[in-house]
Amino acid sequence: MFFCKQGACKTVSFAVNSQPLRIAVLNRIFKPTGGGAERYSIALVEQLAQRHEMHIFAQDIDHQWPSVVYHRIPTPFVKPRWINQLWFAAATWWLTRKGFDVVHSHENTWHGQVQTVHVVPVKYGLLHGRSGWRLFLRYLKIVSSPRLLDYWWLEHARYRVRSDRRIILASRRLQPIMASAYPRSDLLCTVLTPGVAHVHEQASPEEKLAARAKLALPSAGRCILFVGNDYRKKGLPALLGAVTHLPADCYLAVVGNSSQIAGFQHEVQTRGLGERVFFLGALNPVDVAYRAADCLAHPTLEDTFAMVVLEALAFSLPVVVSGADYCGISELLVHEQDALLVEDPRDSMALGSALNRVLSDSVFRAHLQTHGKRFARQYLWSEIALQQEQIYKSVSH
């Protein structure tokens, strides 16, 4: 059977000679420069395509893989987003209603035997912690908003209890949240965290220099890496503040959504960090940035898991990350062993102190690297894909 103990994957058996399945995967965006949910889906598809017939249904596709079939869904409604979400659900229902053994959705759709949840449910966000008049007013807001009604209806349909439905949670952090929002669906839920393809040795000095040259980063100095598409949500403002408390030879490389760079340029200049912050935009793959860096900083304000942390650990990078109140993977990490956890990621002084400790103490840094790699080895995509296959077999026609 399949299960994850404390998020770590256990090997399960899967017969090599099992009949290949015809599987439809639903993602509005299917490209590696997307967010964690998109990269999670892509990594699983690449693993499963070795043994199954994989079909991708998406509106925005930037991916090529042998034997994978891509179906581009038109986008007649870019905005408002809720209408596009409803359109995508309807279009993919029509196209996948016949001819597939399994339909696996990573989106708010009413169809699909397998549903992967990457974020906090809308219902929980709207109603949790409210009672009395506050709850009544929130329901009034929902019924008077076509946007909220759309998301509400799609989500309820998505998590409706069916004998052939399985719900996959991308983080253990989502378990109590789902149980609170949709208690009847709790028995259908299984945790399958993100993973990594490989665990790498620490970049050699030559490899680090080559990576920095490729990214036009300074060859000398200590490089802190930040990776995220939503700069503010992932804690970049606090990180900029932390850099001001670090020695002058420490600089920051920012990887992610290029459209957000302009909004932070002024803050960088105001803080006097113009020569110490380098915006690299979206990278595909991010591997070269992991090789160029000395550590990863991920002071996120909200992450159900945080794939980037696991990826950095797999590249032997020491990591400074928000505590478990803010970041799902931190529930699994041992403080000062696997990574350095910061209780309040908004505290620039505390964040700067943690980064300075990692960057200045070579013995402690080596300790984090050794244990971080050991942690990452528990989360290999090859093992997670076997668990995913077991779920597919349990619901296939």
Image: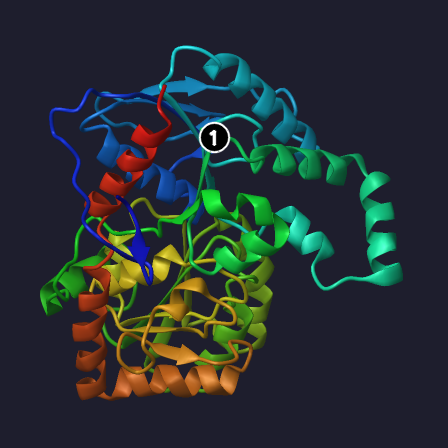
User: Which residue does the image show at 50% across and 56% down from the upper left?
Assistant: 174
Q: Is residue 101 visible?
A: yes
Q: Which of 26 and 237 lies nearest the eye of the viewer?
A: 26
Q: Which image quarter is the N terminus in?
A: top left
Question: Where is residue 310 shown, x and y percent of the image?
Answer: 30, 60
Question: Where is residue 165 shown, x and y percent of the image?
Answer: 46, 32
Q: How is the image coloured?
A: rainbow
Question: Where is residue 42 shown, x and y percent of the image?
Answer: 33, 37
- The reply, left or right, for residue 65 in relation to residue 185 is left
Q: Which of 124 and 357 lies nearest the eye of the viewer?
A: 124
Q: Is residue 246 visible?
A: no
Residue matched to label 1: 163
> Dot 1, crowdedness within 10 Å: few (<14), some or many (≥20)?
few
Question: Where is residue 120 shown, x and y percent of the image?
Answer: 57, 52
Q: Does 207 appear above or below 338?
A: above
User: Which residue does the image show at 51% across and 48% down from the upper left?
Assistant: 186
Kind of residue indicated by mark 1: Ser
Q: Which of 120 and 282 lies nearest the eye of the viewer?
A: 120
- The reply, left or right, for residue 328 in relation to residue 139 is left
Q: Does 69 appear above or below 169?
A: above
Q: Which image quarter is the C terminus in?
A: top left
